Amino acid sequence: MKLLLPTLLLTSMVVACSFLQLSLAYTPSPPVGGVCDSKCEARCKTAGYKERCVKYCNVCCTKCRTCVPSGTYGNKSECPCYRDMRDNRGRPKCP
Ligand SMILES: *[C@@H]1O[C@H](CO)[C@@H](O)[C@H](O)[C@H]1NC(C)=O
């Protein structure tokens, strides 16, 4: 049974690697975050629930390659991805 140890090692490496890729996939990269922060700050300047607005805006911005519509509302046709994102009740997710 000399093959058991290398096989185990290899298997655990593959598993560890796929976990790493999963966590990387869900972590927004810092440069994108910075751009989104400032764009969402502008987008949510007049929002009533500003923190919530910024939070959702950031999610959308990150998923839509930093595209955030200009102005504090509307203009969503500038970013089809942003416009079309829905929450789990089917309502528009992005401010
Ligand atoms: C669209 O964006 C412009 C700025 O680029 C802004 O002045 C205008 O108010 C926005 N439109 C709406 C409906 O918010």
Image (spheres, grey):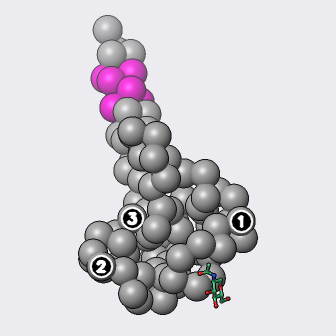
Q: Which residue is mark 3?
A: 56
- Report whether 82 appears left or right of 16: right
Disc 1, SS? helix
**From mark 2 to mark 1, how far is it between C-alphas?**
23 Å
Is 42 included in the stretch rendered in magenta? no
Quadrant in which residue 46 is drawn: bottom left
**From mark 1 to mark 3, how far is it between C-alphas?**
18 Å
- The residue depicted at 30 percent of the width and 79 percent of the height is 48
> 78 above or below 39?
above
Residue 44 is at least partly visible in this image: yes
> 61 above or below 46?
above
Residue 17 is at least partly visible in this image: no
Q: Amino acid at mark 1?
A: Ser
The circle on residue 47 is none
Q: Amino acid at mark 3?
A: Tyr
**From mark 2 to mark 3, how far is it between C-alphas?**
14 Å
Kindly report which numbered mark, 1 or 3, lies closer to the viewer in this rendering. Answer: 1
Q: Which residues are magenta?
A: 5-13
In the foreground, 81 or 37: 81
Within 10 Å of the Cα at label 1, are there few (<14), some (14-19), or many (20+) other Cα atoms? Answer: few
In the foreground, 83 or 58: 83
